Structure formats: structure tokens, C-alpha cells
Image: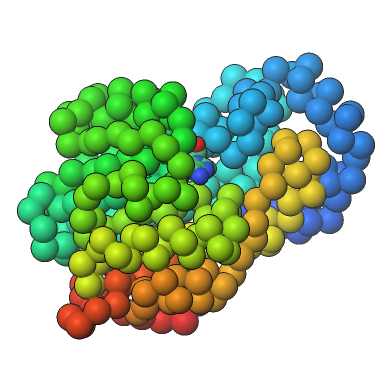
Amino acid sequence: MDELLSQIEFETISPATRLLKAAVVHPLVNYLPAGLLKGVLRLSRSELAAANWADPGGWRSMVISYNGRCRQWADKLLVAGGTIPMALRNRRRLAGKVLAHLIDQAHSDPVQVLCVGAGPGMIIIDAMVQARRAAVATLVDLRDDAHQYASDLARRHGLGDRIRFVTGDARDIGKLADCRPEVVKMIGICEYLSDEEIGQIASALAGVMPPGGAILFNSLSKSHGTDRFFRRVFGLHMIHRSPQDLQEIMARAGFGDFVSIGEPLGVYHVILGRRRGLQPAINGGLEPRRP
Ligand SMILES: C[S@@+](CC[C@H](N)C(=O)[O-])C[C@H]1O[C@@H](n2cnc3c(N)ncnc32)[C@H](O)[C@@H]1O
């Protein structure tokens, strides 16, 4: 595990910057009038704000945060220096690395991967590029334009024939995904779903996954300190849950042997669970540990 994590270049925040954000920046952005902040973002032609206003938490805002290079000054501040975008980039690197490891440890040939709420596909494409073994992935998302972006990206990486796209609602996953995935990725989706919806999706997945199959999902902590800003200004209503909260939901659906790995900003944990069954779970060096 430590060797795997040591290969990742995470973004971090110095204690002085952390203090400055908590004492000055976050109170300002959280409590200045929302109309004023929206006006400034509109005037500065913020692409991140526009993407969230059009589709809060949608795939375009992920691409902007992941790429991290922006033209407008407001986006430079928000995307390069904002805690959530930095944590998102950390989560992408962490989830991509763990997914690549899971693909290499899996048994099916090619390895069957299912991505729920796949968005721009950047994490699974990162993983497929890094993995030594061949995988085929089914990407499920509500939006065709997300699939179009992911399809172009996959083609640019020579993976065009390894990815299948299904447009639909993850809450109907039982009807949508006609595969038997050994690895499931639910990164960046649970924070938009209720406990009941996550439980229902996870139960449907448990019904088609082989024992020992892996599910990867993430928690979200309020430690980023900007929830009020995101709700009022971006219209982004994310549900914050601890790793323990999510593990309990997943455990009720038939998963166990959880391994929870935090990114260094403390905003996201990426959590690996295993489909319980008759076979012992194979963690391939990722030993269960408490969050
Ligand atoms: C925050 S983005 C995360 C994208 C990607 N998983 C990642 O982490 O880079 C959330 C994605 O989930 C999709 N989504 C949200 N609710 C969904 C649902 N009920 N069914 C399918 N997709 C959904 C959105 O369209 C969006 O592309």
C-alpha cells in the first residue's frame, strides 16, 4: 500500500496557507452576499462557475478542475488554489492508481470494469493506461455529452475499442449494465445520491459481481470549509459522509473488507470494498484498515 501511495504526486497546502484560508478566505467567500460573488464570477467570465451553473457538479466542472490550467483570473484562484479542486485532483490520482492496481490483480481476461456516473472518463482512462493487464470498461452516465468527451479521450489514448457507453440513470443500474464486472468504480457520484439510492445501486451491483469483486467509492468531509460558498454561489448541494457512513451502507448491500485511503488534504477518502461471498476477499496487498 505505502509503495503504491508513494508513487503519487499529491497536492498539499502549507500550515500557513491553511491558517490563512480558515481565518480569512473561507469566512469571506462563505459570508459575502451570494449575489455579489456571482456578479464577480460572471464579470470575470469564470468557466468553473458557468459550468456549475449549467450543471452543478457536472462533468465539465470536473474537467476544468482536473486540468487546473485556466485563462480567467477568478478561475486561476478557484481552480489552482481552491481546496476542493486540489482535493479533486488528488482523488483522481489516488483512484486512478488504485484502479490500475485492481485491474492488475483481477482474474477476468480482459478485466471487466463498470464505472457508475463516469463523467469525462478521466479516472478510468488513467487507470487503463497505467495497468499492465487489459481491461474493458462500461461507462454509465446520465449525459451523452460526457460520453462524447470520454470517447474522444479514450481514442486519443488508443483505448477507443475498449470502452462502451451507456446513457442512463445509475439508479436503474440493474437494468442498464448487462455485464458482470469484477471491478466497479463509484468515484464522484455518492455525494449526489441519498443513502437509500446508494444502497439500492450497491445491492444491484452486488447481485452481478463475483465474490471478491472490488468496488471503489469515496467519502467527502466538510473539512474543505467552503460548503456554504458552493451551495449559495454554485448551487452545488453535496452530501458529506464519513468513510464509516459509506462503509455501513455498502456493508448492508453485501460488501466488506474495506480499505480507506485519505488524500492529504483530508477532503476525500477513496474506499475499496469487496463483494462478500464464499471465496475469501483478495486484496492484493491492500489490507483492510479503519478509516
Ligand atoms: C462529479 S461528476 C464525477 C465524474 C467522474 N466519476 C469523476 O470522478 O471524474 C458526476 C457525474 O455523475 C453523473 N451523474 C450524476 N447523477 C447521476 C445518475 N443518477 N446516474 C448517472 N450518472 C449520474 C453526472 O452526469 C456527472 O457526469
Q: Position of residue 226 (x, y in %)?
A: 74, 50
Q: Image point 63% across, 36% down: which residue?
A: 56
Number of marks in picture:
0
Viewed as shown, does residue 104 lie left or right of 259?
A: left
Q: Position of residue 44 (x, y in %)?
A: 74, 19
Q: Quadrant of residue 212?
A: bottom left
Viewed as shown, does residue 167 lie left or right of 114?
A: right
Q: Is residue 130 visible?
A: no
Q: Image point 20% across, 82% down: which residue?
A: 278
Vertical arrangement, residue 154 with respect to residue 253, above or below:
above
* Colouring scheme applied when the structure was drawn: rainbow
Q: Position of residue 131 (x, y in %)?
A: 19, 50
Viewed as shown, does residue 227 lie left or right of 126?
A: right
Residue that sits furthest to the front in the current view:
175
Q: Image point 30% across, 72% down: which residue?
A: 275
Q: Nearer the viewer, residue 15 or 113?
A: 113
Q: Position of residue 43 (x, y in %)?
A: 78, 17
Residue that sits furthest to the left in the current view:
109
Vertical arrangement, residue 111 with respect to residue 143, above or below:
below
Q: Is residue 42 visible?
A: yes
Q: Image point 44% across, 24% down: which residue?
A: 145
Q: Nearer the viewer, residue 14 or 132?
A: 132
Vertical arrangement, residue 220 with respect to residue 126, above or below:
below
Q: Nearer the viewer, residue 67 or 248?
A: 248
Vertical arrangement, residue 23 with respect to residue 53, above or below:
below
**Quarter occupied by the N terminus:** bottom left
Viewed as shown, does residue 76 lie left or right of 138?
A: right
